[in-house]
Image (cartoon, helix red, strand yellow):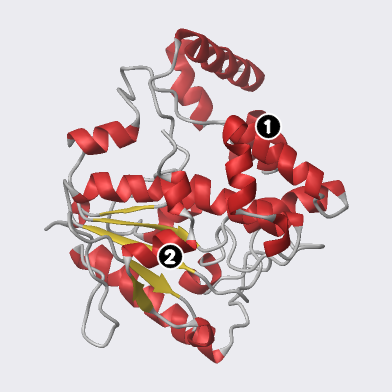
């Protein structure tokens, strides 16, 4: 197997690209993948957005567009994209792939199932409390905790007629706050369920290793939460994986347990980059997903259960997949 024959896959932001960037290409998979090719209206909207973006940058001339864009400072390009990370207020990402039938021929889950992909070993997973980051961003922007009525309005906006079932599955009384309730719904519906579908499809085509990371006391990443605790939110594993503080650029202050977990993460990711298999002597065995079993490697500090393997049933129970996998 050559270094080009492996990939990691994650619902996280572009920082994930550096997991194996020195030896292998990285394919990013988002749990909220589109479910069907874009309509002509959606394609037209994407084209209009692209035009406005290029016009703002002064790179509308197709004859020299690549050179024009390459000559610009990265910050200017980012500014022209007008990206907001307040995804709850925006009701999703501002920039997403457009399935045009040419560059992207179909929704990637369909392509996975059809085997129309580069078949390479895949590592794919998420953090245990993905939604926590987006709650913190919204609360910081609002200057107040998320209310019960706001949480229910967001759930209605995302899930429509399914809302009563969602609210009964995630009753407000079972959570520390409405923000915690909404974070759990986001984590399960938009990450755990989506990646479960992706893993199942990919496992029929290529070796797959599924994981979930959760350090409930991880150093904060992206934002300093003013109200709700981040916990093992979106990207909370990056300070451990790279031993890098998101705010200072220095080595983060880690506990002995976190440092031990950091070393395990580094060895798993390094082994995978080198061989397409995260396993090696001295590490807890990380089983591969098969057609008959879909284990998940839980990557947690010792006081929170440690590194261990969850069965598909345990993982499904944790993330209420009986509800989300029934959604078409």
Badge 1: how crowded within 10 Å, few (<14), some, or many (20+)?
A: few
In percent of the image, x 58 and y 39: which residue is there?
74
In this rendering, the answer to whether 241 lies above or below 61 is below
| In the displayed structure image, the side of residue 131 where residue 40 appears, left or right | left
Badge 2: how crowded within 10 Å, few (<14), some, or many (20+)?
A: many
In this rendering, the answer to whether 23 lies above or below 218 is above
In this rendering, the answer to whether 90 lies above or below 275 is above
Q: Nearer the viewer, residue 73 or 254?
A: 254
Q: Nearer the viewer, residue 326 or 11?
A: 326
Q: Mark 2 against mark 1, which lies toward the viewer?
A: 2
Q: Nearer the viewer, residue 114 or 79?
A: 114
Q: Quadrant of the N terminus?
A: bottom left
Mark sitting on residue 212: 2
Specify the quadrant of the image occupied by residue 217. bottom right
- Kindly indicate whether the residue at mark 1 contacts the one at mark 2 (C-beta within 8 angstroms): no
**How far from the left and from the top, in percent, is residue 233?**
59, 61
> Could you tell me how far apart the alpha carbons at marks 2 and 1 are, in whole angstroms?
31 Å
| In the displayed structure image, the side of residue 215 where residue 37 appears, left or right | left
In percent of the image, x 43 and y 51: which residue is there?
322
Q: Nearer the viewer, residue 154 or 48?
A: 154
Is residue 58 something one can see in this rendering?
yes
Mark sitting on residue 82: 1
Q: Element under label 2?
A: strand
**How far from the left and from the top, in percent, is residue 190?**
51, 45
Is residue 133 something one can see in this rendering?
no
In percent of the image, x 44 and y 23: which residue is there?
98
**How far from the left and from the top, in percent, is residue 241?**
46, 70
């Amino acid at each position: 197997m050559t270094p080009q024959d492996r990939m990691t896959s994650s619902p996280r932001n572009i920082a994930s690209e550096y997991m194996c960037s020195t030896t292998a290409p990285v394919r990013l998979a988002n749990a909220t993948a589109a479910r069907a090719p874009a309509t002509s209206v959606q394609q037209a909207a994407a084209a209009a957005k692209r035009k406005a973006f290029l016009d703002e940058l002064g790179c509308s001339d197709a004859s020299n567009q690549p050179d024009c864009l390459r000559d610009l400072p990265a910050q200017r390009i980012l500014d022209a994209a007008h990206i907001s990370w307040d995804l709850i207020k925006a009701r999703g990402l501002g920039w997403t792939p457009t399935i045009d039938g040419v560059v992207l021929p179909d929704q990637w889950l369909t392509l996975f199932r059809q085997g129309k992909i580069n078949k390479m070993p895949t590592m794919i997973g998420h953090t245990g409390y993905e939604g926590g980051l987006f709650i913190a961003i919204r609360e910081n922007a609002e200057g107040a905790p998320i209310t019960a009525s706001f949480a229910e309005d967001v759930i209605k906006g995302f899930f429509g007629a399914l809302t009563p079932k969602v609210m009964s599955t995630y009753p407000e009384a079972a959570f520390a706050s409405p923000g915690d309730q909404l974070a759990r719904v986001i984590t399960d519906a938009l990450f755990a369920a989506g990646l479960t579908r992706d893993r199942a499809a990919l496992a029929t085509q290529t070796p797959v290793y599924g994981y979930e990371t959760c350090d409930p006391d991880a150093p904060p990443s992206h934002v300093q939460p003013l109200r709700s605790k981040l916990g093992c939110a979106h990207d909370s594993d990056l300070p451990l994986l790279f031993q890098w503080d998101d705010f200072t650029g220095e080595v983060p202050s880690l506990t002995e347990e976190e440092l031990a977990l950091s070393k395990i993460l580094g060895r798993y990711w390094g082994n995978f980059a080198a061989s397409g298999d995260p396993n090696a002597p001295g590490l807890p065995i990380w089983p591969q997903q098969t057609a008959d079993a879909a284990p998940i490697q839980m990557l947690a500090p010792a006081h929170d259960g440690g590194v261990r393997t969850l069965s598909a049933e345990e993982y499904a129970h944790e993330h209420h997949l009986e509800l989300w996998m029934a959604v078409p």
